[in-house]
């Protein structure tokens, strides 16, 4: 589905009922916006992994402007400010008063910014392997210098400057960096596993233009640290011990700055927690929802 908002067309997809029969009443479930990473990622990597969460929340998968199935536009329009404004415009388009935000990686940065700008419209935050500031860039560079192969160092140099020139080059980046993104990465996949990877890549529509705009521009000055104590929504922060791109210290810092937040560290995961420790991830999210979010509905 599409929403024509803020001068562009944003793609979204809905999973699960919003109102469920409960004895003599219809009970409303919270609506959760799924915010993808990147910048320049898309929603497809979260399907069907997040499907079990639709038992507790209605899920709305969103592609940022210029990413996935949403309309493209000038690269300079792919900004954090526009991503946040688009989310609120979509909330209003759907007639929702409050939403839960599930933000992974860059999506977590968008979620934090949204919670600061629109506090009255946030029912909860689920922040997965993300960061509160540009400091993650310096830490990630250091990790690559210490642990990366020469090929990894070469391709991440393109990332740091936001200088990808083609979709093929971006695909190559993810191929080379796959062992860093997931501790369960299989270096010798079966033919079936190779096909699943190819299918996933074909389904997605990553935008190197949006990625360049972020890493080559606004992420270098991104910093919400001083504002985070103003977040009042129930917040779950999920970090990964072996995360290379948003190191675990970033999640710890978010938890230290957001009052009454909860922190879970996945000890056997890198950035791709949903792949590395799927059952533990689901258990952590569902436990938090039942204790901190669902009672309000």
Image (cartoon, rainbow, N blue to C red):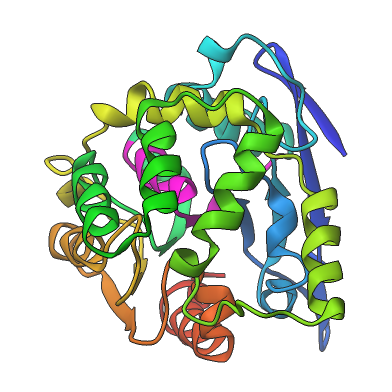
What is the x, y in percent for residue 230? 20, 46
Q: Is residue 207 left or right of residue 161?
A: right
Rendered residue at 21%/69% (across/down): 260
Answer above or below: position of 59 versus 291.
Answer: above
Rendered residue at 21%/65% (across/down): 255
Assess whether residue 114 is covered by the magenta stretch: yes
Answer above or below: position of 73 versus 233.
Answer: above
Rendered residue at 30%/77% (across/down): 241
Quadrant of image for the C terminus: bottom right
What is the x, y in percent for residue 42? 68, 45
Quadrant of image for the N terminus: top right
Rendered residue at 43%/28% (across/down): 214
What is the x, y in percent for residue 87? 58, 35
Find the magenta span and give its range: 95-116
Give the image quarter of residue 62: top right
What is the x, y in percent for residue 75? 57, 14
One can see residue 101 in this view = no
Number of numbered callouts drawn: 0
Assess whether residue 227 is covered by the magenta stretch: no
Foreground of the two, 188 or 275: 188
Q: Is residue 277 left or right of residue 219?
A: right
In this view, which residue lies farthest toward the front?
150
Q: Is residue 281 left or right of residue 26?
A: left
One can see residue 291 in this view = yes
């Amino acid at each position: 589905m599409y929403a024509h908002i803020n001068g562009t067309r944003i793609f979204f997809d809905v999973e699960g009922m919003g109102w469920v029969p409960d004895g003599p009443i219809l009970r409303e479930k919270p609506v959760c916006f799924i915010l993808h990473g990147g910048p320049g990622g898309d929603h497809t990597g979260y399907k069907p992994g997040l499907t079990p969460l639709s038992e507790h929340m209605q899920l709305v998968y969103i592609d940022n402007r210029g990413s996935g199935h949403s309309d493209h536009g000038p690269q300079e329009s792919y900004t954090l400010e526009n991503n946040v404004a688009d989310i609120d415009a979509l909330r209003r388009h759907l007639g929702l008063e409050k939403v839960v935000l599930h933000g992974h990686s860059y999506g977590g940065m968008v979620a934090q910014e949204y919670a600061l700008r629109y506090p009255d419209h946030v029912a909860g935050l689920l922040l997965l392997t993300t960061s509160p500031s540009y400091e993650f860039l310096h830490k990630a560079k250091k990790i690559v210098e210490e642990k990366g192969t020469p090929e990894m160092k070469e391709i991440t140099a393109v990332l740091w400057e936001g200088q990808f020139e083609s979709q093929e080059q971006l695909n190559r980046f993810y191929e080379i960096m796959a062992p860093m993104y997931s501790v369960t990465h299989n270096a010798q996949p079966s033919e079936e596993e190779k096909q699943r990877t190819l299918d996933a890549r074909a389904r997605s529509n990553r935008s190197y233009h949006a990625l360049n705009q972020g890493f080559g521009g606004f992420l270098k000055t991104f910093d919400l640290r001083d504002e985070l104590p103003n977040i009042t929504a129930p917040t779950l922060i999920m970090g990964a011990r072996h995360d290379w791109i948003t190191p675990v210290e970033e999640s710890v810092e978010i938890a230290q700055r957001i009052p009454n937040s909860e922190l879970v560290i996945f000890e056997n995961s890198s950035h791709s927690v949903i792949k590395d420790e799927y059952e533990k991830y689901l258990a952590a999210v569902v436990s938090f929802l039942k204790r901190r979010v669902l009672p309000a509905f």
